[in-house]
Image: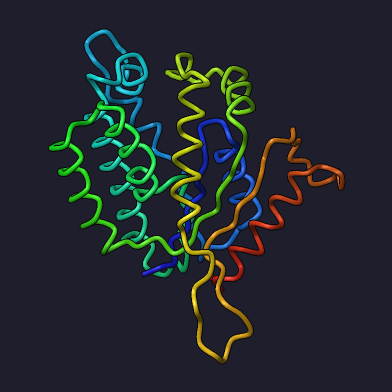
Amino acid sequence: MPVILSIEGNIGSGKSTILKYLQDNNQNDAIIFLKEPVDKWEKIKDNEGLTLLEHFYKDPSKHAFMFQIMAFATRMQILKETIEKNPDCKMVVCERSILADQQVFANMLHTDGLIDSMGISIYTTMANNYLKDYPLDGVIYIDADPSICSDRINKRKRTGESTISVDYLNQCKEYHDNWLKHYPIYKQVPETTASDQPLLLHIKTNENAEFNTQNKNDVANNWLEQIQTFINSFNP
């Protein structure tokens, strides 16, 4: 089983961009990078052409459980297929994880009454069974303030995101913070190694970044360097 790392963070925090640049800078067959399966979500449409993601943001009370099940199934599918098709890979880096879906989004929807007790019980059973077979080894938390995330969302104009409110982003950040403040920072490793293995890397991404490797003052280079060091600590 390869090492499984996830890049977590709010909508608009910079996960997709960071994943892309990590992939570009790691031309290594031992490491595979997986984007969030938004393309699969966008293929599920009603008769009028609206996607499930659009329906979820417009009417979460009606579509919350359905969307969470779809997100779970597609994340599980692409991770499982990737590992099966690449038996020699040493590491998979995912944009978001099943654990984040459970700890952040499913729990938030349940607390808000948008997923009932029976629904969250079904979801938790499915997620826990999956996580036993595909445990998460480490987390890279890309953390930007909700107001910054909102500005970035408005600028990129992705399908289905026009109704995302700052209040929703505030709630998402709160749940990410509450989850990850309890996430272990280090794992005890054998005495033969120099130090404990880091399990969590937390990076603030409020600053505007160019992702220009030729510009030494570009803050993105510092972010990518920290993340690369974290990835390398797992010896992929």
Counting from the top left corner in percent of width and height, residue 70 is at 26, 35
Instruction: State the residue at coordinates (76%, 51%).
Output: 222
Q: Nearer the viewer, residue 11 or 103?
A: 103
Residue extending furthest bottom?
A: 192
Instruction: State the residue at coordinates (32%, 61%).
Output: 134
Instruction: State the residue at coordinates (26%, 8%).
Output: 48
Counting from the top left corner in percent of width and height, residue 11 is at 51, 32
- In this rendering, is residue 231 above or below 203? below
Instruction: State the residue at coordinates (55%, 39%).
Output: 16
- In this rendering, is residue 62 above or below 105? above
Residue extending furthest top?
A: 48
Q: How many marks?
A: 0
Task: Identify the colour scheme used.
Answer: rainbow
Counting from the top left corner in percent of width and height, residue 213 is at 79, 46
Which quadrant is home to the N terminus? bottom left
Q: Quadrant of residue 49?
A: top left
Say left or right for 155 vs 8: right
Counting from the top left corner in percent of width and height, residue 99 is at 36, 50
Q: Nearer the viewer, residue 236 or 5?
A: 5
- In this rendering, is residue 107 above or below 187? above
Q: Nearer the viewer, residue 8 or 235?
A: 8
- In this rendering, is residue 11 above or below 4? above
Q: Quadrant of residue 75?
A: top left
Say left or right for 26 vs 138: right
